[in-house]
Amino acid sequence: MVQRWSFSLLKRRNIATGPRAQRPWSRAAHASYSLGWFCLSALLTSGGFHTGSTQVQAAQTQALVAATRDSDQVVSIADGRNAGAVRTGSSRRDHRTAGVASAPAQVEKINEYIRRSWADYNLSPSAPEADGKWARRLYLDLLGRIPSLAELQAFESSKDADKRAALVRQLLHDDEYTLDYARNWTTIWTNLLIGRTGGTGNNSLINREGMQKYLRDSFARNKPYDTMVHELLTATGTSRPGVEGFNGAVNYLVDKVNEENATLATSSVSKLFLGLQIQCTQCHTHPFNDWKQDKYWEFNAFFRQTRALRRFMSGTDDVTHVELIDQDYAGESNNPEKADLFYELRNGLVKVAYPVFIDGTAINPSGYVSDVNRRRELARLVVDSPYLDQAIVNRMWSHFFGYGFTKPIDDFGSHNQASHPELLTYLAQEFRQAKYDQKQLIEWLVLSEAYQLTSKPTPANEKDDPLLGVRPQFTRYYIRSMSAEELYESMLLVTRGRGDDSNYQSTEDEKSRWLGQFAREFGTDEGDESIDFSGTIPQVLMMFNGEIARAATRTDGGGVLGQVINDQKLDARQKIERLFEAALARKPSKKEATAFFQLMQASNNPVEGLEDLWWALLNSNEFILNH
């Protein structure tokens, strides 16, 4: 017997926080769980999908599988009883079976290295993911949003044997997607360079719009990565668009060079572009890695000529923008011909440092910019360093596969060996030979066999679980939650449809306001910026009752729900199917379709029944997770 209850009970209440208020929700959620698809019980009782807890993540995975356990492609990982329904195949499975009939030679080389690792650990890969759910994954990773219903249906209906490769190239190179691509990677790199809240405070030296404009133009033009790094490290000019001398790239360093003798610039540049955490050696030689205290201060010396100057509105104390300049540096001994700096060892001994790169390459110690521009020399050395290639490859691999070759991804060294060192070296070399073409690197990664796989483990690879502390072997796609920005863009898509290219900045401003709320409600106990939806009670309530969720469940405004409800060509069962496809990139199972059809039949208002279904889909684990 189908349990008849209304999701509107959850949707339309403003529920207060606190243990007393949570209990009725849990009971209602358990009722939905009995239908076999909606996982609110897991989200509310476990705190959702907190990425820092093995136990909670295991619960997330089980909840996700339970959410779709009636689907033909799903196996139960709670007890493994249905595992036999899926053929795990051989570790030599040809990637062409997953809809990739042709791919660059680098793709087969990636497959070769990964298969070799599978054989070494006696592992077999999971089955290839279904086309629809794979496309959803690709859209999230490349464009930062889920596909529209029309985009999904166009891909699934294609008979092209090379349809996955064709979609990858369409999203990377078709003019129709240039703005989506540039917006997503601008968001990613803005957060890396200046943080999610950088430039939002009244006293910030950063101009966020200026940083985003530089990045957006760079990604829209597919600027080579080494060129972008060189520009970020050497930039001079003003920070705000519309001001004479504007150079948006200066916003990376403007708040990192003045304070504390440029220690922020030192740690950020070394971590982000070289994958080296030399900040640990600022005060003492680190006992567990290869970097000594002298290396930190020699690297720091490259930034001593650089200053960020506040520019004021005439006759006021109001800062209008900031100008980043290079100026002569006299050194702490007041001898610009050999401009030095001093640092103190733990035993009290004071030593001197001059600019020397991490590989031991020294430059002219003069502090006169006319003799040597230290930042330009640093940029040249960074771009020539093999660490640059390995650091970006490791970061990109982590973006697409959930884990990098090292953990953390920005901490190379003998103390933190890579899980696949030969593959990391190979990809780094190929990326350099490809002239740092970022879209080319992306194509190699997303056409690889490992990226085609489902997220569902089998008995032949269940021990490949990074949550248990083992190194990832990529026998399946590792589930992770959407970022805050991905969640926003996906909700915006289903609410309004694809955006208008002409109002880019207003859309970004609106997103920033929402993310400000996100940062407050979704933050961690330590006050860090929260990147992912991690399932705290404030997050849950914000998703259930927030404005963007309410907008998504309105039948006007051009969103998915209104289109489906108003489509007179669709019967009730087809409308249920369309909503599942739009939210989850799959059709409902027979059990799901029957249950919700019966709920609609029993409802006095079928439209309200569809609204309830849509709201529940958007608040399910399966929607919020990238799998």
Image (cartoon, rainbow, N blue to C red):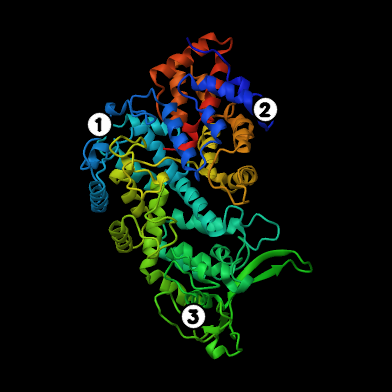
**Alpha carbon separation for disc pair 2 and 1:** 45 Å
Q: Amino acid at mark 2?
A: Ala
User: Residue 588 appears at what percent x and percent y?
Assistant: 41, 22
Is residue 575 shown left or right of residue 608? left
Q: Within 10 Å of the Cα at label 3, are there few (<14), some (14-19), or many (20+) other Cα atoms? A: many
**Alpha carbon separation for disc pair 3 and 2:** 60 Å
Q: Is residue 437 above or below residue 497?
A: below
What residue is pinned by disc 3? 355
Q: Is residue 345 above or below residue 468?
A: below
Whether residue 417 is visible to the viewer of this picture, yes or no, is yes
**Residue depicted at 66% across the width and 30% down the height:** 19
Q: Amino acid at mark 1?
A: Arg
**Residue depicted at 59% across the width and 71% down the height:** 257
Label 3 residue SS: loop
User: Residue 511 appears at what percent x and percent y?
Assistant: 59, 44
User: Residue 197 appears at what percent x and percent y?
Assistant: 61, 53
**Residue depicted at 52% across the width and 36% down the height:** 493
**Alpha carbon separation for disc pair 3 and 1:** 58 Å
Label 1 residue SS: loop
Q: Are marks 3 and 1 in contact (CB under 8 Å)?
A: no
What residue is pinned by disc 2? 21
Q: Amino acid at mark 3?
A: Pro
